[in-house]
Image: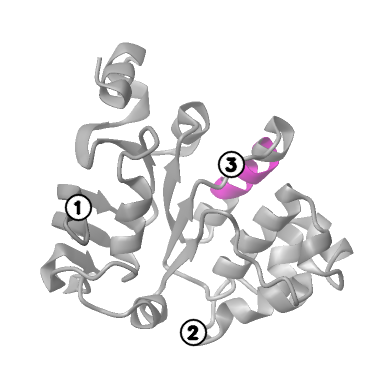
Amino acid sequence: MALLETRKLTAFYRDFQALFGIDTRLEAGETVAIIGANGAGKSTYLKAITGLLGGEPESVWFDGKPIGALAPAEIMQLGISMVPEGRRLFPSMTVEENLLIGNYGRSVPGHWSIEAIFELFPRLRERRHQSSTTLSGGEQQMTAIGRALMSNPRVLLCDEISLGLAPIVIRDIYQALPRIKATGTSVMLVEQDIVQAMKVADRIYCFQEGRISLTGNPSALTREQIHVAYFGS
């Protein structure tokens, strides 16, 4: 049984249908990447999983139970945490305060604590008392990831964590993902950067216009297969 699964998942924005029968699986201890062009439905997919878009109860399953109709707070309490696109830190708070708020509503024993986050991202220790508005884009992303980890989630959802960052910063952030996985946290990564996603993923799903156009192990997929699935030609 998969840890996290979607079954015939659909999603709508009023009369506009954004997802069409999405079937995906995330196994315990696995990293899965969701790739695709802008508008393919990747972020909508994460919103549906986290309850930000309402759906049918049995369209999303977690640990063998249907969660598709639960509220975002209930889903977070179960152990699903998300790093949102654009970071969305609290500007009036320091780095440390942004991190500490991450376990609000879910305080469970586990690997991740404020000290563990500082070990993962040492630059945040140096800036722990600074306002989040004074951070670089990479430091903000590290803070957003750390905040999500503070709830010791079983599943970490990451939405476009490389967006707008310099290549050297992207490298540093992606180097943290195997360490996160090693603690027992399963990772689902939504990413436009195909190269980065395929380096860390055990499996990928490619979305195209709200449907899955390709799935498989990155090492078994050809560049041509990915190109066709990504762009449609």
Q: Is residue 2 visible?
A: no
- Where does the image place residue 116, in percent across and percent down from the top left? 69, 67
Indicate left or right for 207 with 126 as reference: left
Q: Identify the residue under disc 1.
A: 16
Q: Amino acid at mark 3?
A: Ser
Marks 3/1: CA distance? 28 Å
Q: Mark 2: which secondary structure?
A: loop
Q: Who's the residue at 31% across and 12% down the image?
A: 224
Q: Identify the residue under disc 3.
A: 162
Q: Which residues are magenta?
A: 171-178
Residue 42 vertical placement versus 82 (above, below)? above
Q: Which of the marked residues, 3 or 2, is nearer the chain's N terminus? A: 2
Q: Who's the residue at 22% across and 74% down the image?
A: 67
Residue 13 vertical placement versus 214 (above, below)? below
Q: Who's the residue at 72% across and 71% down the image?
A: 91
Q: Which of the marked residues, 3 or 1, is nearer the chain's N terminus? A: 1
Category of crowding for the residue at label 3, using alpha-carbon neighbours closer than 10 angstroms: few (below 14), some (14–19), many (at least 20): many
Residue 40 vertical placement versus 109 (above, below)? above
Is residue 176 highlighted in magenta?
A: yes
Indicate left or right for 138 with 81 as reference: right
Q: Residue 194: which disc?
A: none
Q: Identify the residue under disc 2.
A: 106
Res. 143 image quadrant: bottom right
Q: Which of the marked residues, 2 or 1, is nearer the chain's N terminus? A: 1
Is residue 118 highlighted in magenta?
A: no
- Where does the image place residue 167, in percent across and percent down from the top left? 68, 31
Q: Amino acid at mark 1?
A: Phe
